[in-house]
Structures are given as C-alpha cells and as structure tokens.
Image: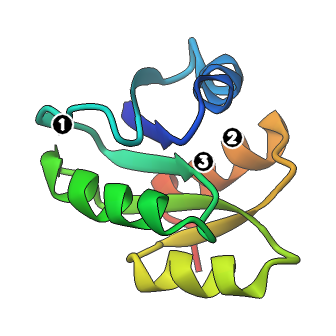
Amino acid sequence: MQIHVLADTPAKIQKIRAMLEPRYAISAALLGAPATGVTAASIVIDADLRNVRNIESIRQALPKVRGASQRLFIVDQSARAAVVQAWSLGASSVIPSPLDARSLQHRLAMIYDGTEE
C-alpha cells in the first residue's frame, strides 16, 4: 500500500519513513516544496498546525495526492487549535504526538482492516 507523507521538516519525514518502511511503500514531500501529482491510499501529515504557512501549504498539497481516502494528522494534543485545524483540513484520524511506530502502524492497520470507528 502506498502512503504519502507530508511534513514541515525533513526529520519528521525520515522518522515516519523509518516507522513504516518496508511494510508500506512511502512517498514524501516537504511542505512548501514544489508539489507534483502522486497517487497514494493514505496521507500522513506531521506539521505544526499553528503555523499559517503550513496550513496553506497543506491545503495546496492535498488536492495533488490522488486516491487518498484517508488523511492521518499527527498533532500535539495539548494544542487544541491544532487538533481543530486538523479536522477542518479533512482529517480522517488525528494521532497524538509524540508519535511512536506502534501507534501509527496500529492506526493504519485499523483503517485498512476495516475496523476504524
């Protein structure tokens, strides 16, 4: 299954990639970089949603990811505004940070095994 990662730092992309490969095929893009069309089953987004530039970059990038039925946002649960912003950007799931591999893999397995609430 192809998963596309959007993040605001290269370190976040590398961390998510390390958690999901080789189980999933990963493509990735840094927010603000020129976006190209990509096809993926899901998008995992890890960015500071208190930053207006990040929000706008996410809005511009989402339509360029074809076929993504799920949008998983990784957010700081203590920043209520970030959680609300994730839902307003079309989140299918919001995962609290700091992120661990088990939580992310479990959430993806729940979605694709059809057990997501």
**Dots 2 and 3: beta carbons under 8 Å?**
yes
Q: Which circle marks residue 8 in the picture?
A: none
Residue at 43% in and 23% down? 26
Rendering coords of residue 54 (x, y %): 47, 57
- The one of 24 and 26 positioned closer to us in this rendering: 26
**Dots 1 and 3: beta carbons under 8 Å?**
no
Q: CA distance from mark 2 to mark 3?
A: 6 Å
Choose the circle earlier in sequence order: 1 or 3. Answer: 1
Q: Quadrant of residue 40?
A: top left
Amino acid at the residue labelled 1: Thr
Choose the circle earlier in sequence order: 1 or 2. Answer: 1
Q: CA distance from mark 1 to mark 2?
A: 20 Å
Rendering coords of residue 9 (x, y %): 60, 33
Q: Is residue 3 above or below residue 65?
A: above
Write down the residue under mark 3.
109
Write down the residue under mark 1.
39
